[in-house]
């Protein structure tokens, strides 16, 4: 069976932004190659056609507790 490789891109939070707009100082687009043949049994790879970025996500990028029930986004993940 031939191995299929898929290019995967994702935004990574590399620094918190306590105020102001997010810039390239805070976010980085990273690309990796996913070897679809190496997926564990009963796992799948999916292609997202659309994503939604909700306002509460911005509060998770402040780097401090702002009273959300959810925790802050981890850096470099």
Image (cartoon, rainbow, N blue to C red):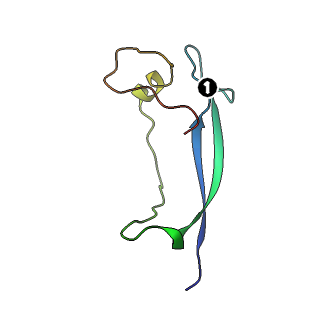
The number of callouts visible is 1
34 horizontally vs 50: left or right: right
From the image, which quarter does the C terminus lie in?
top right
Residue 51 in percent (x, y) is at 46, 46
Q: Residue furthest left?
A: 69
Name the residue carrying label 1. Answer: 15
Provide the secondary structure element on which disc 1 rests: loop
Position of residue 74 relative to residue 42, above or below, is above
Q: Residue at x 35, y 27 (%)?
A: 70
Residue 30 in percent (x, y) is at 65, 46
- Frontmost residue, 23 versus 65: 65
Residue 9 in percent (x, y) is at 60, 51
Q: Residue at x 64, y 42 (%)?
A: 29
Position of residue 49 relative to residue 68, above or below, is below
Residue 28 in percent (x, y) is at 65, 37
Q: Residue at x 43, y 41 (%)?
A: 52
35 horizontally vs 73: left or right: right
Q: Residue furthest right?
A: 25
Q: Residue at x 63, y 27 (%)?
A: 26
From the image, which quarter does the N terminus lie in?
bottom right
70 horizontally vs 48: left or right: left
């Amino acid at each position: 069976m031939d191995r299929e490789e898929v290019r995967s891109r994702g935004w990574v939070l590399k620094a918190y932004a306590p105020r102001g707009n997010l810039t390239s100082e805070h976010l980085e687009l990273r690309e990796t190659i996913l070897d679809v043949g190496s997926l564990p049994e009963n796992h799948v790879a999916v292609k997202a056609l659309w994503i939604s970025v909700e306002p509460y996500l911005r509060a998770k990028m402040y780097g401090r507790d702002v009273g959300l029930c959810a925790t802050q986004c981890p850096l470099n993940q």
